[in-house]
Image (spheres, rainbow, N blue to C red):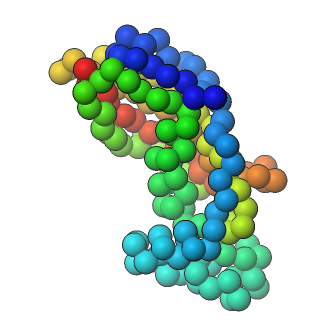
Amino acid sequence: MTTTADGLAELLALAGRDLGRTEWREITQDRVDTFADAADDHQWIHVDPERAAGGPFGGTIAHGYLTLALLIPLFGELLEIRGTRMSVNYGLDRVRFPGPAPVGGKVRLAGRVASVDEVPGNGVQMALDFTVEVDGSDKPACVARAVYRHYA
């Protein structure tokens, strides 16, 4: 279920809140290949299913940065922000890729609002702890703290 926040006061009130989990999303070879082209990263563990079948993961896997990029559409399933004039991605405090996201597997995003603080310019800075979970795996594909700024 998507949480909705309308304006800076409601964003400030989200500090410490668990936003839950998204629906599962399949990792397809087509998506991995498209990302490989965009990033110019054609390492065989991502784009060569035949060779990757004999590799350390038993098949092709998503790039770590592709997994990280999935935060963008998945986060929209967790939180809808209204009543602001602008939101910007301010950066990342920490990113790790503990386990693979296998092609053909499914991932989902778990999110928690770590903090929300006022910033100059009539805005708030929001830090979110994200975990990209992999269906059937004890290890997440990505763990990250993302920082966003929202301005009224």
Q: Using the image as rendered, state which of residue 143 and residue 106 is in the foreground.
A: 106
- Most extreme residue toward the right is 136
Q: Position of residue 15 (x, y in %)?
A: 49, 17
Residue 140 shows up from this direction: no
Pick the front one: 135 or 24: 24
Residue 149, position as x, y percentages in the image: 32, 30
- Residue at 51% x, 61% y: name it: 66
* Image quarter in which the N terminus is found: top right
Where residue 43 appears, x then y in whole percent?
53, 81
Q: Position of residue 89 (x, y in %)?
A: 34, 41
Q: Quadrant of residue 12?
A: top left
Q: Vertical placement of 16 versus 75: above or below?
A: above
Q: Residue at x 43, y 13 (%)?
A: 10
Tally of marks: 0
Residue displayed at 49% across by 81% down: 42
Quadrant location of the C terminus in the rendered image: top left
Pick out the residue farthest to the left. Answer: 121
Q: Is residue 45 left or right of residue 8?
A: right
Front residue (pair 77, 32): 77
Q: Residue furthest bottom?
A: 50
Location of residue 47 by image quarter: bottom right
Near-viewer residue (141 or 33): 33
Residue 109, compared with residue 106, is above or below; it is above
The answer to whether residue 57 is seen in the rendering is yes
Left or right, 5 with reference to 84: right
From the viewer's perspective, tell me whether residue 12 is left or right of residue 71: left
**In percent of the image, x 39 and y 35: which residue is there?**
147
